Image (cartoon, rainbow, N blue to C red):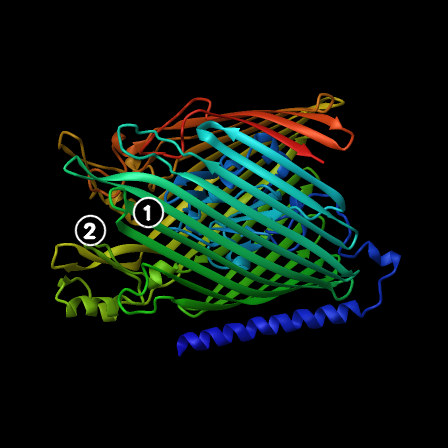
Amino acid sequence: MITQHRNHSCMRLIWGVCAVMLFCTRAATAQQVPSDSSRADSMRTVRMAPMVVTATRSEKVLEDVAVPVSVITSDIMEREGAIRLGDVLAYEMGMALFDDHGMGLQVQGFASDYTLILLDGEPVIGRTAGTLDVDRITVKGLSHLEIVRGPSSSLYGSEALAGVVNLITAPPAEGMQGSASFRIGSHATSDMTLQMEGGRERLGARLVVNRYASDGYDLTPGIYGPTTPSFADWTGDLRSRMVLSDRVLVRLGARGTIENQESVFASETDGLLEDRYNDEGRRLEWSIHPEIEVRLSNKVRLNTTLYGTSYQTETHHRRQDDGFVNYEDEFDQTLAKAEMQVDVLWNTKHLTNLGGGVIGEQIGGSRYGETGSDPNPESTQAYFFAQHEWLASDLLHFNTSVRFDNHSDYAARVTPKFAVLIRPSSKIRLRASVGSGFKAPAFRQLYLSFTNPAGGYSVFGSLPMDEGIRRLEAKGQIEQKFFAISQLDPLLAENSVAFNLGGSVEPFTWLTVQVNAFHNNVRDLIETQPVAQKTNGSFVYGYFNLARIYTRGIELEASIKSQLVKQSSFDISLGYQFLQARDREVVTALKEGTVFGRLPNGRDYRLGLGDYTGMFGRSPHSASLRAAYINRDLDLIVSIQGRWRSRYGYRDLDGNNLANRSDEFVPDYAVLGAAVTKSFTVVQTVEAVVQVGLDNAFNHTYPTLVPSLPGRRGHVSLEFNF
């Protein structure tokens, strides 16, 4: 009955939004067409200044945003030879990629599940153990990326505790044009893209089809099976627009991806090879995103969106000898969202954004419903947000925002944020912000019900835990319980309070320096902990609000844009981040002198705070480089990009819950890449672009520690624009 009630409530809200969309469209199209004098204020006005939308949910000049924001354009992606999202983010200041169930993204020291990834403002779903694999997303067809650092829960809710990365697709162009590209590289890696777009003043569409494939690679030839599997990934993306009147714009986005993976591995016992298996995987995802933008007047705009998306995976381990399926796993996640936002420009100094919506989400798979609980758990969420921008003077800009989230599975949340921009001169901008963020418990932390048949252990989310323990007790499988399960507190959302302070200065026309200091206090971090021991000696695990952490640091970036001669220039961007990411309980124990390390020879020694380099997977120091030489006379671009990160802990060998020995760290390493791009005019309407590129020039490999570094790689690509 609860599930039916949730479904009916969610559908009523979504249909209500649809009705409002239809009503607003009819009302606006019936209005008189504005005069030429007012057309400059219409939706089709072309703004030449760089604009961003993610930081404030409305268009704003980049340099006038009060929070740390950076933009990566398609020109940068193309000249660097980037084809996947991970290729782009790897060289961005303060961004760190790490291997954990896919290629995850760290922002300000937070793991991947604390950063929200958006596509045209809508959430990308499909995480494995919290990690959203950024390498599964092609950058073909994107106009630019917008990266907001720091908590953005006051506008976007959960998962935006560390920041937001918004992938903005390019709008369809007028007229007919297209492109076709083919790239081949090391490990039989290939990328093929066909793009067609066209339209008129009031109607346009763009279709992008991309195929990305590789044979994988093997960095451990002594072990049966590759380091990464072979795969083939197909993505189709459709974007269209229709101007119904000078006040009504309709957009539609649709995207679909299908990927097949193949690999092999062998089971071993006492070092002896036993059975060999084929590892077969499949991923299917799609999304659809209709949107209506209505200008009710020259000062009021209404934006209404619907969004639906699905993510499905399946894995099979099939024994090579007889085809026996030893293991299979399935996962299915769907999300439906309806949202309305109204923007009111009161005058030249005040802008208000009000919005709200409803989200319905459902998951299913092999690891849910094992204890008799709902095998397809769902949740519903209603939210409301408000934001006001006040341009008090040319010197001071204020931004205040707040969001209320009411979720079916955890307590309601209110997340405020306040930011200020100070402009002492046209060359100097100072920024300060304070805000709270939160991360809702993930579905696995709420609903997981899973027993590993090989290991014998069980894991329960907070909701089915009581029933799961009762069932195991009824079967005589529980030896002892560590807690009174029925009296455990409900799982809470993780909470943070964050401060950002920084600014930018332009001492010369060719130099811009930006700095940002941040401090994030996080409490109620969700961790796993044993709740009972089974009669087979294994444990039953649950999820609890336990840890308190903080991350703090400084980000520094210097950008140089210089015109050498009339048709020649170079762009250089140098970035550096200092980071401390620490567990407060570990810090307290180190100060009290109760933490010890153990050397390989068995000798114990006391550890101090100076021995603590931070949480696992976090480098205290990192640097990035982006440089390009552009010669327009020769239609030539030479690009160099690099990144360096200091050593970081990845395992605990002496049982003290931190990395302190040299064999517990990944050594520091640098990755350098380069690309040379040359354009030719084939015929009057056809341009050819040839690119030769090199990645990981230093040939760094860490097969077990950093499997995403396959050594030195090269690529050649050819593109035709017509």
Q: Splitting the image into 4 quarters, where does residue 660 fall?
A: top left
**Vertical side of 639 occupied by 292: above or below:** below
Q: Residue at x 72, y 43 (%)?
A: 49
Confirm or deny contact between disc 1 and disc 2 (CB under 8 A): no
Q: Can residue 704 be seen in this view?
A: yes
Q: Say which residue label 2 marks.
A: 455
Q: Depth check: give the residue in front, 680 or 623.
A: 680
Q: Residue at x 32, y 59 (%)?
A: 366
Distance from Cα at disc 1 to Cα at disc 2: 29 Å
Task: Tell me the kind of residue under disc 1.
Answer: Asp
Mark number for residue 583? 1
Question: Is the N terminus in the top left, top right, bottom left or bottom right quadrant?
Answer: bottom left
Compared to residue 189, the image places residue 333 above or below, namely: below
Mark 1 Cα shell of 10 Å, populated few (<14), some (14-19), many (≥20): some
Front in this rendered view, residue 658 or 235: 235
- The image quadrant of residue 698 is top left
Quarter residue 692 falls in: top right
Describe the element under mark 1 as helix, strand or loop.
Answer: strand
Query: Can you give x and y, in whole percent of width and height, for residue 374 in the image?
Result: 34, 69
| Residue 225 placement (x, y as % from top left) | 31, 35
What's the residue type where badge 2 is placed?
Gly
- Per the rendering, the mark at residue 110 is none
- Mark 2 burial class by Cα count in 10 Å: few <14, some 14-19, many 20+: few
Residue 550, percent across and down? 39, 48
Q: Is residue 446 left or right of residue 213?
A: left
Give percent across and percent down for residue 667.
34, 28
Q: Residue at x 73, y 57 (%)?
A: 242
